[in-house]
Amino acid sequence: MRWLAYMPLRGGSKSIPGKNIRPLAGRPLFAWSLGAAIDSGCFDEIWVGTDSDDIRRSVEQEFGPKVKLFRRGAQTCTDAASTESALLEFATAVDFDVLCTIQATSPLTRVEDFRRAQQRFDEQRADSLVTAVRTHRFFWTDDGRALNYDPLKRPRRQDWAGTLMENGAFYFSSRAVLESGRCRLGGKIVVHEMAADSAAEIDEPEDWATIERLIEKSRPA
């Protein structure tokens, strides 16, 4: 099995200009989850795909030859382009059996997450894997329908396992699933549960300080 990790990054960011290479707690944003992937030892190769020369230089400065660079086409770097379009573009050029798609906006991903997820994927003979966190919140539709519990039998927190919520940290996809369904998830899907704080993502400027505090809190004294 040839395991590759791929982080698709693009230069344009409307909400936070230069977001992917902006320093977060002393490192570029992308370096947190990418560094965890490198340290995990799970992957035969680790790649970053980008259309930005600034991002390329930052990746080279941070990780050198540990990370390979892929030049993304303009069509996969527009605001309307899906992540799947970037993955399929990459798949046409680079050989792999399983691809791990890593999101830079989830910097609280840890080394052990990649290791435990890979073990689960292998043990379950899965085709794809999604990461999630457990929540004990009750969810509703706009038209007043409960999604994850029965209001007539409202569970006590201590008696309820809760619901798994996708956190977008990373995904595993077999080549067969990605190419046949043109989607990162398909076939037999398994879930890797992560720590609650990994649900924090950087999408808006106000998220920055919040996640910096979480990173500093998790560092050894």
Image (tube, rainbow, N blue to C red):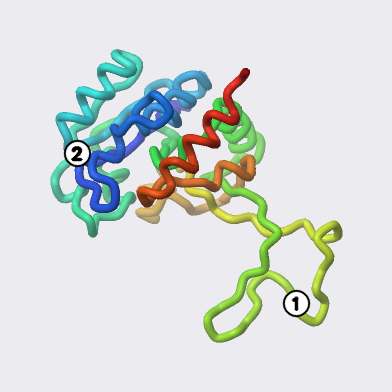
SS for tag 2?
loop
**The C terminus lies in which quarter of the figure?**
top right
The amino acid on which the numbered mark 2 sits, given as a three-letter code, is Arg
Residue found farthest to the top: 65
> Which residue sits at x=24%, y=34%?
93
Which mark's residue is nearer the viewer, 2 or 1?
1
Question: Which residue is more in the foreground, 125 or 190?
Answer: 190
Question: Which residue is more in the foreground, 117 or 139?
Answer: 139
Tell me the distance, in whole angstroms, between the alpha carbons under discs 2 and 1.
47 Å
Can you give x and y, in whole percent of width and height, for residue 15 in the image? 28, 52
Left or right, 200 with respect to 204, comes to: right
Q: Which residue is mark 1?
A: 150
Height in image: 62 above or below 89? above
> Which residue sits at x=22%, y=30%?
55
The amino acid on which the numbered mark 1 sits, given as a three-letter code, is Asp
Please say whether residue 7 is visible from this viewpoint.
yes
Please say whether residue 91 is visible from this viewpoint.
no
Can you give x and y, in whole percent of width and height, for residue 142 in the image? 52, 81
* Dot placed on the residue nearer the N-terminal end, 2 or 1: 2
> Which residue sits at x=28%, y=47%?
16
Q: How many neighbours does mark 1 have within 10 angstroms: few (below 14), some (14-19), or many (20 or more)? A: few
Question: Which residue is more in the foreground, 185 or 212?
Answer: 212
Q: Which residue is mark 2?
A: 72
Can you give x and y, in whole percent of width and height, for residue 22 in the image? 30, 33
Residue found farthest to the bottom: 143
